[in-house]
Amino acid sequence: MKYTDITTVRLPQELDQKLETYSSLWNTTKTEIIKEALQNYFANKESEKDSWEVGESFFGNYGNGVSDMSQTYKKRIKEKLRLKAHHTRPADLVASVQAAGHTGRKTSRKG
């Protein structure tokens, strides 16, 4: 490996003391420790995943059992708003319709 650039780094005293201690303990140079630390840092940054990649395996696995939610969301919102406007819960609505004698079937008028 060819070395052409020299980079000066200002370190806090505590970090510089640790660097000095470890270079003595491991019988290596400060330069080698710093190069290895930078290589590890860059390798970790390159392998970091964004939020989509982290959660990708969970997306769609834990649903509410409604498989067509993305296709019928407008219909569901309209129904909720309609029920809210009438201050009626779905069970109450079904009961009132049945009590009124509606079967839910469309009837054709002949005339």
Image (spheres, rainbow, N blue to C red):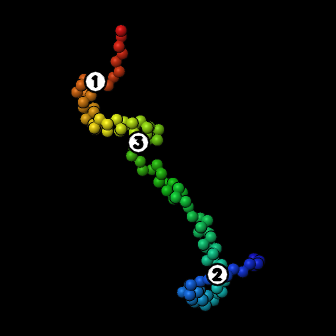
**Residue type, mark 3 in image:** Val
* Residue at image point 69% right, 80% down: 7
The residue nearer to you, when weighing 100 against 12, is: 12
Measured from the top left, where is residue 89 in percent x and y? 28, 38
User: Marks 2 and 1, Cα distance to the nearest angstrom?
Assistant: 82 Å
Q: How many marks?
A: 3
**Residue type, mark 2 in image:** Val
Of mark 2 and mark 1, the one earlier in the sequence is 2
The residue tagged 1 is 102
Assign a secondary structure to mark 3: loop
Residue 9 bears which disc, if any? 2
Q: Residues within 10 Å of mark 1 (few under 14, many from 20)?
A: few
Q: Residue 87: which quarter of the image?
A: top left
* Residue at image point 54% right, 57% down: 53
Using the rendered image of the protein, determine whether residue 44 is visible from the camera's viewpoint: yes
The residue nearer to you, when weighing 34 against 10, is: 10
* Residue at image point 59% right, 64% down: 47
Q: Which is more foreground, mark 3 or mark 1?
A: 1
User: Marks 3 and 2, Cα distance to the nearest angstrom?
Assistant: 57 Å
The residue tagged 3 is 66
